[in-house]
Image: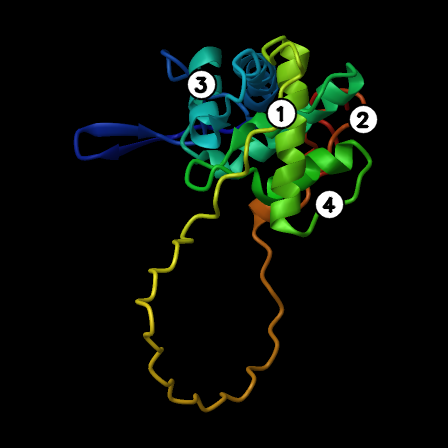
């Protein structure tokens, strides 16, 4: 169990790990994730009741913590994937569309590579092309709206994929104007290949085939074994 120590910064107590509100009683990551999976399913089901609605991963992380009265000092990027993957399994088991497709990045509005886990649950290969991945997720969201009854009578259409962040239209060039010649660049020698470092939060999550919760590095499910 995570001990959840309390660090004193000046006169402000800052909790660490996982704890229950409002008492501050420490709890474990496994208990927190189990509670958050239930809340995430309910929140995403609610989001699906509004046609073309989505929820950012930041807002989803906050809502599941507030609804469960279990909080953590860790950012959602470190644990939300362990919540959305079991939700995807629950949807698949229940014959429902993948509700995790409704959770998008707060900056880009895209599902990103995390959506590959949803595809794997459906026994499909990951989509490497970002635009094709987002288009697939938009279609999955449409299925969620139809399932929740928020799509129009004709079935509706997928919402347009948001423009990639950082892309801006080029300024129009004046008629007859020509671009200034560019100075040719001297090619740099290729850098030696380096082995990419894989962060712990980027590694694939193993899910228990009985309760669909994330399995820790020990390989033993905290709920079933």
> Label 3 to label 1, Cα distance in Å?
28 Å
Q: Residue at x 62, y 16 (%)?
A: 145
Spatial CA distance of label 4 from label 1 is 23 Å
- Which of pointers 1 and 2 lies earlier in the amino acid sequence? 1
Front: mark 4 or 2: 4
Helix, strand or loop under label 2: loop
- Name the N-terminal-most of marks 2 and 3: 3
Alpha-carbon distance for marks 2 and 3?
Answer: 27 Å
The reply, left or right, for residue 96 in relation to residue 12 is right
- Taking depth in this image into account, of 221 and 57 the one nearest to the observer is 57
Secondary element at tag 4:
loop
Residue 161 screen position, x and y as percent: 54, 38
Please indicate, yes or no, whether residue 73 appears anywhere in the rendered image: yes
**Dot 1 corresponds to which residue?**
157
- Residue 68: give x, y in percent of width and height: 49, 13
Label count reads 4
Mark in the foreground, 4 or 1: 1
Choose top left, top right, bottom left or bottom right for residue 143.
top right
Q: Say which residue label 2 marks.
A: 209
Q: Position of residue 45 (x, y in %)?
A: 59, 13
Name the residue tied to disc 3: 63
Element class at badge 3 = helix
97 and 118: which one is in front? 97
């Amino acid at each position: 169990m995570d001990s959840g120590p309390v660090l004193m910064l000046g006169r402000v107590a800052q909790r660490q790990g996982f704890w229950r509100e409002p008492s501050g009683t420490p709890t474990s990551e496994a208990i927190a994730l189990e509670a958050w999976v239930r809340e995430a399913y309910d929140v995403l089901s609610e989001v699906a009741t509004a046609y073309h609605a989505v929820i950012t991963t930041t807002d989803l992380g906050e809502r599941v913590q507030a609804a469960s009265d279990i909080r953590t000092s860790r950012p959602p990027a470190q644990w939300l994937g362990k919540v959305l993957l079991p939700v995807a399994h629950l949807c698949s088991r229940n014959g429902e569309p993948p509700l995790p497709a409704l959770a998008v990045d707060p900056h880009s509005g895209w599902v990103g590579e995390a959506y590959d886990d949803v595809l794997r649950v459906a026994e499909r290969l990951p989509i490497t092309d970002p635009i094709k991945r987002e288009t697939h997720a938009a279609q999955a969201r449409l299925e969620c709206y139809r399932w929740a009854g928020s799509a129009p009578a004709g079935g509706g259409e997928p919402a347009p994929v948001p423009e990639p962040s950082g892309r801006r239209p080029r300024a129009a060039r004046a008629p007859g104007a020509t671009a200034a010649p560019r100075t040719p660049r001297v090619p740099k020698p290729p850098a030696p290949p380096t082995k990419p470092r894989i962060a712990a939060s980027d590694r694939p999550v193993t899910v228990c085939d009985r309760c669909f919760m994330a399995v820790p590095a020990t390989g033993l499910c905290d709920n079933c074994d």
